[in-house]
Image: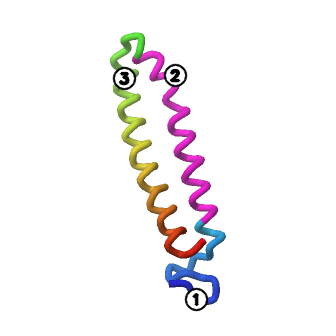
Amino acid sequence: MILNGVDRDGRTGCYRRKAVLEDYEKLKRLVESAADDVAKAQGGNKAAGTRVRKIMQDVKSAAQELRKKVLEARSAGD
C-alpha cells in the first residue's frame, strides 16, 4: 500500500527501482565470476566444478531475490 508516494515499508518507488537494478547487476557479476572456473571445469578440474556449482547456487538465490523485487515493484504500480 502506498501513501504519499511511500509504500508501507517506508520505501519510495525510486528506491525500489534502484534496488532492482542493483540486484540485477549483482546477478550479472555472479555469472561473470564463474567464467574462468567453467572453462577449468570443462577441462576436467574437479575443484573448479565445485566452485561453479557453488556460484550457480548463489546465482539461483540472487535470481530469486531479483524476481521478488520485480514483483514487488509491479504490485506497487511502479
In the displayed structure, 52 sits above or below 17; it is above
Q: Which residue is mark 2?
A: 36
Indicate whether residue 46 is drawn in magenta: no
Q: Secondary structure at mark 3?
A: helix
Q: Position of residue 77 (x, y in %)?
A: 57, 75
Instruction: Give the alpha-carbon distance from disc 3 to disc 1, as whole Å.
Output: 49 Å
Q: Residue under circle 1?
A: 3
Do the numbered discs 3 and 1 sit on residues whose CB atoms are within 8 Å? no
SS of the residue under disc 2: helix
Residue in view at x 52 percent, y 25 percent: 35
Q: Quadrant of the C terminus?
A: bottom right
Mark 2: few, some, or many residues within 10 Å (few <14, many ≥20)?
A: few
What residue did someone put label 3 on?
49
- Residue 70 against residue 36 in the figure, above or below: below
Name which residue type carries label 2.
Asp
How far apart marks 3 and 2 lie (CA) works out to: 11 Å
Magenta segment, prevailing SS (helix, strand or loop): helix
What residue sits 50% from the left and 84% below the top? 1
Look at label 3 and name its amino acid. Answer: Gly
What amino acid is labelled 1 in the image?
Answer: Leu
